[in-house]
Image (spheres, rainbow, N blue to C red):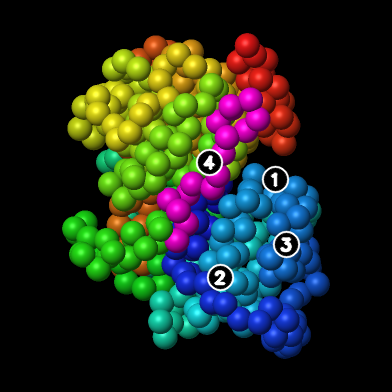
Amino acid sequence: MHRRAVRSLSAVALISIASFDVSLARAQAAAQQGAVTIPDTPAGRVFRAWLDAFDSGDSSKLDAYYKKYQPSQSAANEMNFRRTTNGFDMVSIEKSEPLHLEYVVKERARGVSAFGVFDMNADGNTVKSATLLAMPPNATAADFRIDGAERTRVVLGAISSLSEYYVFPDVATKMGDTVQARLKRGEYDSMTNGLAFASRLTDDFQSVSHDKHLRVNFSAGRLPDGPRAPTSDMLAQQRRQMERVNCGFVKVEQLPGNIGYLKFNMFASPDMCGATASAAMNFLANTDALIVDMRDNGGGDPNMVRYVSSYLFSTRTHLNDLWNRKSGQTEEFWTLDTLPGKRFGGEKPVYVLTSSRTFSGAEEFSYNLKMLKRATIIGETTGGGAHPVAGRRIDDHFIIGVPGARAINPISKTNWEGVGVEPDVRVAASDALTTAQKMATEKVKP
């Protein structure tokens, strides 16, 4: 997902907001940043611009940074990450090349360290990828080092998982041939950092498949040997994390003219977040029109897509299907017959706001409603990711997310993979809300 999910995963790992005197924090940060020299390279200069904007806690500065260097990312989502960490202090620069930077920072909230990899595009002016990973307790930069034997093991393991599970077997073969050839040519020989290697493999696999859900991830700590049921402590921690971010729900509002407005930035599991979603939808049930803001939503659980969508229909409706390559089975997704509270219903107008950052489950939500002619889509073409993904362990430190299924809309018989969801009304994402308000106001005029 380009690097859409990486930052949010890091945010879950780097938890806890500490309250302390802001002026003291800034003074300490200035002293710490001065102790580590960020290289005067294209990568170093842009990285410093990000760090300065991030540490400022100023959403307008972050917004300006992303518009200039990383337009695929969202300042709105980054502010959630900023509140979680309270900013970062520089610890070290581990590797510096003109377009590549590896570094260690420490979050100010609780002193948790994180290892980062920052890569620029060939133009030296835009960011290709930025990955930040929390370090386990007592870990050091040395725990991120890998050797030739592990590089080979990871490549072969990733290819094996793709061959067995990837949704299109012929594409899996092409990806495997391409990456194995690069391994044999020695293109990976200089890569000694696990996080950077995972990022490079992700780029190389995606260069063939163009599948933004497919990615290789690295863990400095040892990964579990296989799937295991979450413990009660793990579930409790997940619940606390969801509570801390309000399950991704940002705003529920009654706009002038009795127009409802709902903004949420993830589709979390309904098992943990169904009550939050129901509270939002119940609040909006009596509005005359509804605007659902998906501009910063990166997706999530298809069961939550169904859960929220169910409030927008009065009768049982077929939303989407998921076909699994390995099993050959198709799972149908219909609206739910029973929901807490009152539905918005299937008659009043709905408008969905999109941007190029709208991805995965948020695209399914938009696409389903568009195909059913239940909503008017306003904004930009979305990111183009329609393949659900599952993690496949490669070894103690590497895992690959393999898209093993594909969405099949019951009306179009296809999906939005690689092309995105086209809006009904095309405007810049920044203008989508104003446009939707005007359209809704006109629609519900007495």
Measured in 3D between alpha carbons, the distance from the residue under mark 3 to the one under mark 1, in whole angstroms, is 17 Å
Query: Residue 261, relative to residue 344: is it above or below?
Result: below
Q: Amino acid at mark 1?
A: Pro
User: Mark 1: which secondary structure?
Assistant: loop
Q: Which portion, as a residue range, is magenta?
A: 244-260
- In this picture, residue 373 sits left or right of residue 273: right
Around disc 1, counting alpha carbons within 10 Å, would you say few (fewer than 14), some (14 to 19), or many (20 or more)? some
Cβ–Cβ under 8 Å for marks 1 and 2: no
Q: Earlier in the sequence, mark 1 or mark 2?
A: 1
Side (left or right) of 236 relative to 228:
right
- Vertical side of 432 occupied by 227: above or below: below
Which residue appears at 66% of the width and 52% of the height?
Answer: 75
First in sequence: mark 4 vs mark 1:
1
Task: Give the x, y percent position of residue 393.
Answer: 30, 57
Nearest the eye: 41 or 408:
408
**CB atoms of marks 3 and 1 within 8 Å:** no
Label 3 Cα crowd, 10 Å radius (few <14 / some 14-19 / many 20+): some
Label 4: which secondary element:
strand
Q: Is residue 285 left or right of residue 96?
A: left
Kindly identify which residue carries mark 3.
58
Label 4 crowd (10 A; few <14 / some 14-19 / many >=20): some
Res. 85 mark? 2
- Mark-to-mark CA distance, 4 and 1: 26 Å
Nearest the viewer among 340 and 25 is 340
